[in-house]
Image (cartoon, grey):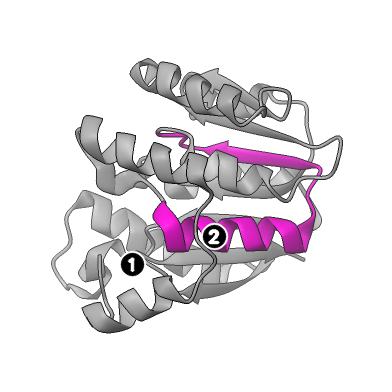
């Protein structure tokens, strides 16, 4: 996942606004208790998501893939006064830690948690979104995009995580997850409904703006 020399990565993080104390505690608890803690957005990516959210000033955010709630909290920082994040995760075992930190952040009125399969949940959402963040099972990235694109406002954004997939996107022989990421990246480049930039931040962020 790390593409820069360690010293440059450390310099980058040391010259980025520190994560708030609550997120730092969530970061530590995730790494100490979760089976695959590397799924956490973490300091640099979290501050990137917060910065983008502040720039966009969204009223409605959809997140597909909550994990322990770190990215949802980061995204919520840029919401309008009446704004809301709807975050979906299929794993109910994460719900307690998500709710714990959302409550501590006094964000329970701003972040709505839905436990369920996003492929079934998203079509039932009667909302129009300014920002969508996709960070779930890689095989369904293209499906998630197709489900959300018509629910995104013109000029709205879709951000997708892990699009460099630890550098595996460069390999000729790809497993199913890697191939799904490669197909998704090509799809974003070819889809005339959006313009895109692939940022090599952490494991890669694809940022698409709906035309």
Quadrant of the image containing the N terminus: bottom left
Are dots 1 and 2 in contact, CB under 8 Å? Answer: no
What residue is at 58 percent from the left and 40 percent from the top? 73
Give 96 or 198, whichever is nearer the viewer: 96
Can residue 44 be found in the magenta stretch?
A: yes
Disc marking residue 47:
2
Would you say 142 lies left or right of 176 here?
Answer: right
| Front in this rendered view, residue 181 or 100 | 100
In space, the residues marked 1 and 2 are separated at their CA atoms by 19 Å
Q: Earlier in the sequence, mark 1 or mark 2?
A: 2
Q: Is residue 201 visible?
A: yes
Percent x, y for residue 209?
A: 69, 65
Q: Is residue 206 above or below residue 64?
A: below
Quadrant in which the C terminus appears: bottom right
The tag on residue 164 is 1
Quadrant in the picture for residue 170 = bottom left
- Residue 56's spot in the image, x, y percent? 76, 59
Bounds of the magenta segment? 42-67
Q: Secondary structure at mark 2?
A: helix
Q: Eyeballing the image, is 152 above or below 202?
A: above
Crowd rating for badge 2 (residues with CA inside 10 Å; few <14, some 14–19, many 20+): many
As drawn, is 183 to the left or to the right of 104?
left
Q: Residue at x 23, y 30 (%)?
A: 33
Q: Residue furthest left?
A: 173
> Considering the numbered disc 1 on the image, is that residue within a helix, a strand or a loop?
loop
Place residue 157 in its image quadrant.
bottom right
């Amino acid at each position: 996942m790390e593409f820069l020399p360690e010293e440059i990565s450390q310099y980058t993080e040391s010259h980025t606004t520190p994560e708030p104390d609550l997120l730092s505690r969530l970061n530590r608890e995730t790494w100490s208790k979760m089976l695959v803690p590397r799924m956490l957005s973490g300091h640099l990516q979290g501050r990137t998501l917060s910065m983008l959210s502040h720039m966009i000033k969204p009223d409605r955010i959809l997140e597909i893939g909550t994990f322990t709630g770190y990215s949802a909290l980061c995204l919520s920082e840029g919401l309008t006064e009446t704004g809301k994040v709807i975050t979906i995760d299929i794993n109910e075992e994460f719900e307690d830690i998500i709710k714990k930190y959302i409550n501590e952040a006094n964000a329970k009125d701003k972040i709505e948690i839905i436990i369920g399969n996003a492929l079934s949940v998203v079509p039932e959402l009667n909302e129009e979104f300014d920002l969508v963040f996709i960070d779930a099972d890689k095989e369904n990235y293209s499906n998630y995009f197709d489900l959300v694109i018509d629910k995104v406002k013109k000029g709205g954004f879709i951000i997708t995580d892990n699009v460099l997939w630890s550098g595996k996107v460069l390999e000729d022989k790809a497993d199913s997850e890697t191939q799904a990421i490669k197909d998704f990246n090509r799809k974003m480049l070819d889809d005339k409904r959006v313009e895109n930039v692939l940022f090599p931040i952490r494991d890669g962020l694809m940022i698409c703006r709906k035309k």
